[in-house]
Image (cartoon, grey):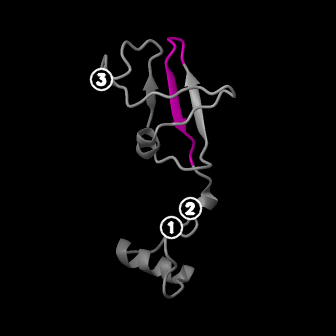
Amino acid sequence: MFLTCKRKVRKMNKRRIDDEVLVSAATVTSKGQITIPKEIRVKLNLHSGDKVNFILDESGVVRLVPLTRDVKSLKGIVPKPEKPVSVDDMKNTVRKRRGGEFERT
């Protein structure tokens, strides 16, 4: 998902500008920092500590692109099965559903 902002904006209170939606504005601090507006953070599913890339193209359009999360952050999303499943059990289930033996390549 990309967030696109044009540098030249006529009125900041407009919600739609030239087929692009302007959700909110941010102010750059003396340290060069901005706060990403809540509407944008929610839309991009950004949380504290997440990383983003800023991509500037030749026409002056800046894209804010969330970086994918570290696989370690996914731990715990899928609950552990009540009973551990062995590799043989998995192979047997696949065989039954495929209707035949595995082919080794």
Residue closest to the far bottom: 83
Instruction: Give the structural element (helix, strand or loop) at label 2.
Output: helix
Amino acid at the residue labelled 3 = Arg
Circle 1 is placed at which residue position? Answer: 77
Horizontal arrangement in the rendering, residue 56 relative to residue 12 (left or right): right
Along the line of sight, which residue is nearer the eye, 4 or 71? 4
Horizontal arrangement in the rendering, residue 88 relative to residue 21 (left or right): right
Along the line of sight, which residue is nearer the eye, 104 or 7? 7
Q: Is residue 1 above or below residue 8?
A: below
Circle 3 is placed at which residue position? Answer: 16
Circle 2 is placed at which residue position? Answer: 74
Q: Residue at x 48, y 15 (%)?
A: 7
Q: Residue at x 50, y 83 (%)?
A: 89
Q: Quadrant of residue 101?
A: bottom left
Amino acid at the residue labelled 2 = Leu
Residue closest to the far right: 31
Q: Tell me where residue 59 appears, x and y as whole percent.
A: 50, 11
Amino acid at the residue labelled 1 = Ile
Q: Residue at x 55, y 70 (%)?
A: 76
Q: Give whichever of discs 2 and 3 has the lower sequence position.
A: 3
Instruction: Identify the magenta region.
Output: 57-68
Circles 2 and 1, Cβ within 8 Å, touching? The answer is yes
Number of the front mark, 2 or 3: 3
Along the line of sight, which residue is nearer the eye, 20 or 22? 22
Instruction: Give the structural element (helix, strand or loop) at label 3.
Output: strand
Graded by Cα atoms within 10 Å as few (under 14), some (14 to 19) or many (20 or more), the crowding at tag 2 reads few
Number of numbered discs present? 3
Q: Residue at x 52, y 79 (%)?
A: 80
